[in-house]
Image (cartoon, helix red, strand yellow):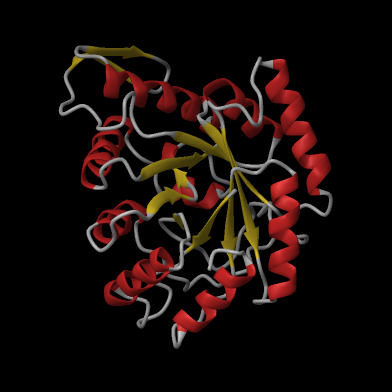
Amino acid sequence: MHVGIAGFFGNSPRRDLPFARDFAQTIEALNFRTLSLPEHVVFFPTYESNYPYTEDGVPNWGPDTGIFDPLFVAQALAHATTKLRFVTGVLILTQRPALLTAKEVLTLDHFTNGRFELGVGSGWSWEEYNALGVDFAKRGRRLDEYIEALRVAWTDERATYTGEFVHFENAVMNPKPVTPGGPPIIIGGDSPAAMRRAALLGDGWYGWWAQPDIQAHIGRLEEILSTHGRDLNGDDFDFKLGLPLSEINPNEIEAKVELATSLGVDELILAPPIPSKDFGTHLETVARAAGLV
């Protein structure tokens, strides 16, 4: 099983480009495989929307939290590393133009030499969609079309796609991606709809270990995949699981890594609280607990 780590940049003045570069080089040296990068365009002081990863449905961060654009961050850090992979965790794809995103992602595929994976989701914040002028209620159908349209643009010499939300004819997008067929598209989200989307359209699934009974949750995913003729541990399916950590507890990390391995997870993405000061020491503690060094 591979182990990655989630990185948060822009949420304080000290977490700037030099910090992000040093962070990426440090985790690469510690044998973490992937750096996961979150996305939100804007936050709000209060939400009517339900945040799905806390018990009370309220986001566990403040409205002044900063996040840099993950595509720009991945491109910058790719030049500071040689083997570290990058995944968006996740890009809210339907808040962006489909073809523009296709071009940005294939550029990343070239400039990272195939080290970028596109994690996508439909999001949860009605407020953010509204601010960006996109219909929140139709985000699921829009996401399905976007995934299909990206692959068409990446693979067809004269690309045509006709849908409810995306339409283009004889569009020529070059150069084609370095990765055959384009970068892997990993579907994020823990709802049954997200799991079905992963089974039907995804190269994998990126879940979040926020449920008390993770084994039952993964069992539901296995059932959905089986219904659509796919296998959770098949060679054509990348099973990623994000693990939020409230503290750096080596015993907890070691136990969770052991459990994730037994569950057939391909890559466990750890999300520990990493301070800006002396972050290398904390990252080394995490890496040792995960058995990477």
Q: Is residue 142 left or right of residue 231?
A: left
Location of residue 213 in the rendering, given as x and y in whole percent from the top left corner: 84, 49
Location of residue 212 in the rendering, given as x and y in whole percent from the top left corner: 83, 54
Location of residue 275 in the rendering, given as x and y in whole percent from the top left corner: 50, 82
Residue at the location (66% across, 77% down)? 247
In the picture, residue 98 is in which quadrant? top left
Residue 83 in sight from this viewpoint: yes
Q: Is residue 36 above or below residue 173?
A: below
Q: Residue furthest front?
A: 293
Residue 37 in sight from this viewpoint: no
Q: Is residue 232 left or right of residue 147?
A: right
Residue in the foreground of this view, choosing between 288 and 217? 288
Location of residue 135 in the rendering, given as x and y in whole percent from the top left corner: 48, 35
Residue at the location (37% across, 66% down)? 24
Residue in the foreground of this view, choosing between 65 and 201? 201
Q: Residue furthest bottom?
A: 277
Q: Is residue 155 above or below residue 177?
A: above
Residue at the location (15% across, 26% down)? 174
Q: Is residue 154 above or below residue 204?
A: above
Q: How many marks?
A: 0
